[in-house]
Image (spheres, helix red, strand yellow):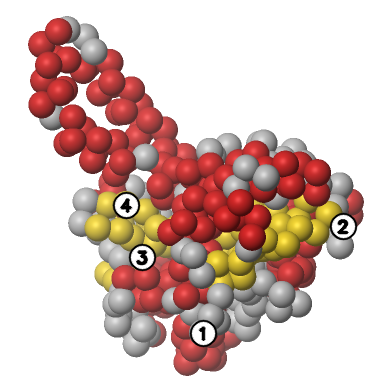
């Protein structure tokens, strides 16, 4: 385990770039002082932000590039224009070269996935990356994947997600055999598409030692914490994520409006202020920011593009924890243990981004 966690940052990624990335990393540095940063992007913009954060500046090295991947670029465009030159590529390549332990970017999701896959390559038995994130639930936290790295997935892909998600849950939650559920439109075995029913049958038959398959989970089961790991393909996973984030903001606005409606409600808010703050913090999507791109020969974390500095800090925290928990080794161990089983399943077809 490294004495220092070396984090490569795509300083130009996201809606506003360095003005969020640098302050966010500085917040994370307070929580994790054993961190060093490698910053890729336009040096003038980065240095201007570092001047406001002396502690961050002291543990950072800046690598200049004036090439940035646009939030609107298609993955193919990003690879053509930004390969070996963009801040996103250089951050990922630092992991490949061993100069960094993890790369974090708030940039274009499709471009990040394509570049990470092209630069780092996939682990044996894995066809394509998946975005996995920690999801707050009524009984604690769960790992949910895929949250939008790729669209669609056959039985082989869903099984790989189950194995990788279980590895992440085991290191984060200290579980020997995490429970795994497949997200579906019902819990009955006859429901859902052919791919998900085939994946369920294979998971039951294989009875993998590193996970406990519990069956199908409906959408409301995510928030209930029906399983330690919820598996779905990227299309439905991304919809579930955005719906949950939107609902959290909606409820927060409802509460704010209700508390300000009358003088009595304002007085009541004063008495219950701490309780409402705890609720707001629990429902704050930024505090669950940071999805891990699983399946790669390296650790890459995706932050929301429109997050603020506090939200980006949580994404940096996730990267730090994945290195400290040695996630990549755990996934490799699980894949090597059951790699022949994954290899024997039908290969997933590529999704078109």
How far, Cα to Cα, is label 4 from label 3? Answer: 12 Å
Look at mark 4 in the image and give the residue it sits on.
Answer: 136
The crowding category of the residue bearing disc 1, from other C-alpha atoms within 10 Å (few below 14, some 14 to 19, many at least 20), is few
Residue at 33% across, 60% down: 142
Q: CA distance from mark 2 to mark 3?
A: 37 Å
* Spatial CA span between label 2 and label 4: 37 Å
Quarter of image, res 52 = top right
State which tag comes first along the sequence, 4 or 3.
4
Secondary structure at numbered mark 1: loop
Q: Which mark is residue 85?
A: 2
Tell which circle, 2 or 4, labels the residue nearer the N-terminal end: 2
Q: Residue at x 37, y 54 (%)?
A: 135
Visible residue check, residue 48:
yes
Residue visible at 30% across and 58% down? 141
Q: Nearer the viewer, residue 40 or 195?
A: 40
Mark 4 and mark 1: Cα distance apart in space: 28 Å
Q: Are marks 4 and 3 in contact (CB under 8 Å)?
A: no
Neighbours of disc 4 within 10 Å: few (<14), some (14-19), many (20+): many
């Amino acid at each position: 385990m490294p004495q220092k966690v070396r984090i490569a940052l795509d300083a130009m990624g996201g809606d506003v770039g360095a003005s969020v990335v640098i302050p966010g990393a500085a917040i994370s540095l307070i929580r994790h002082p054993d961190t060093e940063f490698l910053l890729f992007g336009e040096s003038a913009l980065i240095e201007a932000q570092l001047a406001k954060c002396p502690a961050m500046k002291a543990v950072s090295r800046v690598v200049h590039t004036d090439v940035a991947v646009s939030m609107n670029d298609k993955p193919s465009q990003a690879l053509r224009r930004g390969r070996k030159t963009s801040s996103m590529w250089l951050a990922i390549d630092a992991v490949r070269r061993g100069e960094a332990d993890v790369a974090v970017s708030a940039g274009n999701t499709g471009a990040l996935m394509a570049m990470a896959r092209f630069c780092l390559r996939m682990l044996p038995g894995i066809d394509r990356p998946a975005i996995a994130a920690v999801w707050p639930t009524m009984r604690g936290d769960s790992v949910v994947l895929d949250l939008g790295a790729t669209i669609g997935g056959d039985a082989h892909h869903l099984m790989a997600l189950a194995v990788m998600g279980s590895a992440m849950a085991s290191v984060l939650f200290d579980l020997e055999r995490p429970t795994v559920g497949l997200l579906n439109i019902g819990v009955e075995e006859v429901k859902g598409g052919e791919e998900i029913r085939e994946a369920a049958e294979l998971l039951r038959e294989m009875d993998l030692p590193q996970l406990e398959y519990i069956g199908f989970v409906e959408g409301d089961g995510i928030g209930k914490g029906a399983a330690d790991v919820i598996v779905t393909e990227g299309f439905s996973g991304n919809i579930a994520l955005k719906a949950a984030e939107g609902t959290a903001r909606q409820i927060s606005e409802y509460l704010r409006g209700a508390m300000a409606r009358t003088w009595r409600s304002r007085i009541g808010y004063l008495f219950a202020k701490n309780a409402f703050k705890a609720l707001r913090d629990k429902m704050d999507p930024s505090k669950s920011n940071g999805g891990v791109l699983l399946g790669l020969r390296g650790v890459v974390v995706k932050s929301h593009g429109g997050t603020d500095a506090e939200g980006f800090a949580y994404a940096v925290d996730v990267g730090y924890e994945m290195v400290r928990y040695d996630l990549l080794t755990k996934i490799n161990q699980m894949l090597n243990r059951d790699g022949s089983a994954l290899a024997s399943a039908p290969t997933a077809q590529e999704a078109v981004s």
